[in-house]
Image (tube, rainbow, N blue to C red):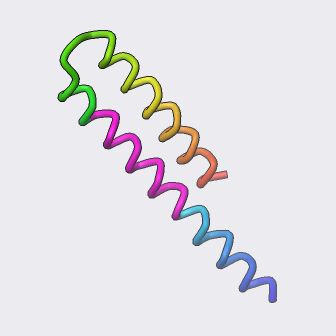
Amino acid sequence: MIDTILFILQVIGYIFIGIGTFFLLLASIGLLRMPDVYNRMQTATKATTLGALSVLFGIG
């Protein structure tokens, strides 16, 4: 019973790490594709914050 719960929690953690990695990748692509500095800052801030928090949530 305990092993099943730990396995499910581990899978959920891996999912959050994958989601965070995806958003960090989107942030780096957004930095390359946006036309001016303000759009780049906005894209990088939102996606990086969400990505980093998702990775930290998956680890914790």
Whether residue 16 is in magenta: the answer is: yes
Whether residue 57 is in magenta: the answer is: no
Between 52 and 35, the one nearer to me in the picture: 35
Residue at the spot x=58%, y=39% of the render?
A: 53
Seen from this angle, which residue lies furthest top?
A: 37
Residue at the spot x=58%, y=72% of the render?
A: 11
| Image location (x, y in percent) of residue 28 | 28, 34
| Image location (x, y in percent) of residue 10 | 62, 70
| Image location (x, y in percent) of residue 31 | 25, 26
- The number of numbered discs placed on residues in the rendered structure image is 0
Left or right of 4, for residue 59:
left
Residue at the spot x=67%, y=51% of the render?
A: 60
What's the magenta region?
Answer: 15-28
Left or right of 2, for residue 32:
left
Q: For the stretch drawn in magenta, what is the main secondary structure?
A: helix
* Residue 45 in the image: above or below residue 15: above
Dividing the picture into quarters, in which one does residue 36 lie?
top left
Residue at the spot x=47%, y=28% of the render?
A: 46
* Residue 29 in the image: above or below residue 8: above
| Image location (x, y in percent) of residue 13 | 59, 62
Left or right of 6, for residue 15:
left
* Residue 26 in the image: above or below residue 45: below
Dividing the picture into quarters, in which one does residue 33 lie?
top left
> Which quadrant does the N terminus fall into?
bottom right
Between 18 and 42, the one nearer to me in the picture: 42
Seen from this angle, which residue lies furthest right?
A: 1
